[in-house]
Image (tube, coloured by chain):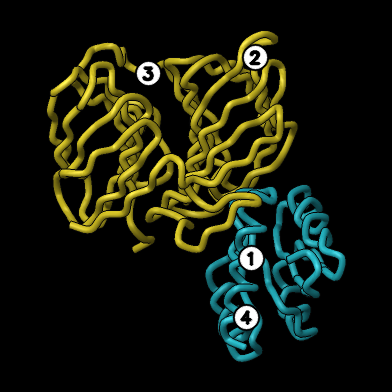
Amino acid sequence: MKQVLHLAQERGSANHGWLNSHHSFSFANYYNPQKMNFGLLRVLNDDTVAPGMGFGKHPHDNMEIISIPLQGDLEHEDSMGNKAVIREGEIQAMSAGTGIFHSEYNASKSDQVKFLQIWIFPREKDVAPRYDQIVLPDLSKANTLHQVLSPNPDDAGIWVHQDAWFNMGTFDNGASQSYDIKRSNNGVYAFIIDGSFEIEGQKLGKRDALGLWETDTIQIKSLEAGSRLLLIDVPMNFS
Amino acid sequence: MLHTPIKFVAFNTNEKILRILVRILKRGASWECSGIAQIEQVQSALEDKPDVLVIGVGGQEQYVAQWTNYCETQGIHIIHHYGGGSGLLFNSIQAYLDQKEQSS
């Protein structure tokens, strides 16, 4: 088993006033050649946007873009005619493919929105752009990993054009769980949303992350009540 | 980074995105960029010896293979651009400049 540890305080950060962003991987003005990606996971931004503010209309192409609000609501509008609010407890996926323009704003005029934005390289380039959002399963059921994303439209969660699976869960203090990696040549990037965990012997706090690969299974143990994590199971390369 | 002279050719069949890419790739004080939306025109643009070819939407496999072979012989760096705006593009340019500095 190989592993890489990314501590929360070692992430890149950018505070633009209206946007406070923490970058797990190199992004925009943050450049660290040691942190360009984890396999085909290229971006994990932990964003806080001020009330009523947001990202104006901008393009994307050939990227699978997933947004997960952690607190508050995010307003989305795109060039395919979609206009929607993604609420806490929902997940949005956009396949940019041959090109899409979209905007994202904090839907509230009084409260911050906090969300994760995740970019994964697609399995194939130049697909037709698509947009989807779903309500997540009830994540309040403790000590269970819930699949929230997969490559299969018929499987649980939202789907994307990549052999990637996301699982989320909230755990009681001391609760343990094993996770089987879905596909050979995939790795798992475990991102701690809240609380603390021990994963394969490594203690991790809020917003720390541990990437693991060349293994089939990982062992997870919660170290405090209400600990919440996101497991990103992605191919380690394009082959 | 913005003060290092770089000559780009940007290819993208999505013309709206191409216009944005070209604007971004002219942001540096000494950056030049030619934007190309027609795949057949890329090869002749490469013969003008740019420093970097940026490949976006519409880069069909057989053409990309042909450009890659040509660029290797001419010392032209290739950036496969994903994502649309500048979020990843500036990272890719910085990586190119690092690589160039290490090899010189």
In the picture, which quadrant includes the C terminus of chain A?
bottom left
Q: Tell me which amino acid carries mark 1.
A: Gln
Q: Which numbered disc, 4 or 1, marks the residue that appears first in the sequence?
A: 1
Q: Chain of mark 2?
A: A
Q: Tag 2: residue type? A: Ala
List the residue tagged with mark 1: B94
Outermost residue, bottom direction?
B73
Helix, strand, or loop for circle 1?
helix
SS category of the residue bearing label 4: helix
Residue appearing at x 54%, y 73% in the figure: B62
In the rendered structure, the residue with mark 4 lies on which chain? Answer: B
Q: Are marks 4 and 1 on the same chain?
A: yes
Q: Provide the letter of the chain coloured cyan.
A: B
Q: Is residue B25 left or right of residue A46?
A: right
Shown in yellow, the chain is A
Q: Residue A155 occupies which quadrant of the picture?
A: top left
Q: Nearer the viewer, mark 2 or mark 3?
A: 2
**Residues at marks 1 and 2, CA–CA distance in whole angstroms:** 35 Å
Numbered label attached to residue A201: none
Question: Badge 4 is on which residue?
Answer: B101
User: To which residue does mark 3 refer?
Assistant: A136
Front residue of B2/A107: it is: B2
Q: Secondary structure at mark 3?
A: loop
Q: At 76% across and 61% down in the image, what residue appears? A: B37
Is mark 4 in CB contact (under 8 Å) with mark 2?
no
